Amino acid sequence: MPREIHYNAADHISAASAEDPYLRPAFTLGNRVGRLLWNICWAIFYRLSPRPFHAWRAMLLRLFGARMGPNCHFYPSSRVWAPWNLTCEDQVTAGDGAEIYNPAPIRLGSHAILSQNAYLCGATHDFDDPAFPLLAYAMQIGPYAWICARACVAPGVQVGEGAVLGLASVATRDLEPWSVYGGSPATKVKERQRIH
């Protein structure tokens, strides 16, 4: 399935904003102000909150536009780049150091898990364009999927229901439902037993 670009900075940022395209902002002023306010909130109220205060951190994410189902467990050192682009169903977990870089919408299904230092990368740059614009892709992590510790999911990759991306693996292509992947780039290792 071809990946569809959800956001192309070249469509939103004027070329007149900087003579050198590498110095142009990738996002509007409003987006940058929103992220500044969120980062202040993250540093003071989210990051310093006690580990068991999952409901508190979910509430902070909701205040900045995230749609969070019940019983989500986001740990204090987890990072969300743009809460307003995050949708979580119930019982989603983001472990310590897990990072969701989401310039475009990212959806995590019921019981999806991002283990310690997992990284969801929602954007890249068009390296064939001299202006090097940022390109962001909508992504979905299916219900019961598990992104293991230090594993990375590349921009636009869709993770199927129940898929497992093994320790420190890198998913550069869509992951089939109820399958286990490992390596860099990740390849299918075996089928996973369905748990429901």
Image: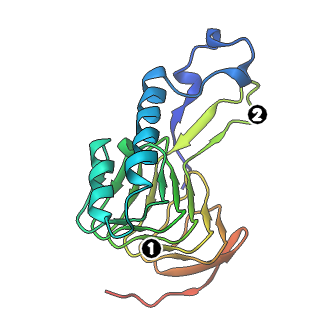
For the point 56% across and 81% down, which residue is it?
180
Residue toward you, 19 or 132: 19
For the point 63% across and 8% down, which residue is it?
16
Dot in front, 2 or 1:
1
**Left or right: 17, with 193 as reference point:** right
Helix, strand or loop for disc 1 = loop
Q: Residues within 10 Å of mark 1 (few under 14, many from 20)?
A: many
For the point 48% across and 59% down, which residue is it?
78
Q: Which residue is mark 2?
A: 128
Can you give x and y, in whole percent of width and height, for residue 22 in the image?
Answer: 73, 25
Residue toward you, 20 or 40: 40
Question: The C terminus lies in which quarter of the figure?
Answer: bottom left
Q: Indicate the amino acid at tag 2.
A: Asp
Can you give x and y, in whole percent of width and height, for residue 21 in the image?
Answer: 71, 20
For the point 49% across and 54% down, which residue is it?
79
Up/down of 173 relative to 14, above or below: below
Q: Indicate the amino acid at tag 1.
A: Ala
Residue contact at pointers 2 and 1, CB within 8 angstroms: no
Can you give x and y, in whole percent of width and height, for residue 84 in the image?
Answer: 36, 42
Q: Residues within 10 Å of mark 2 (few under 14, many from 20)?
A: few
Up/down of 109 relative to 26, above or below: below
Q: Quadrant of residue 151?
A: bottom right
Can you give x and y, in whole percent of width and height, for residue 18 in the image?
Answer: 67, 13
Residue toward you, 6 or 147: 147
Helix, strand or loop for disc 2 = loop
Q: Which mark is residue 145?
A: 1
Residue toward you, 88 or 189: 88
- Real-space Cα distance between discs 2 and 1? 33 Å
Question: The N terminus lies in which quarter of the figure?
Answer: bottom right
Q: Earlier in the sequence, mark 2 or mark 1?
A: 2
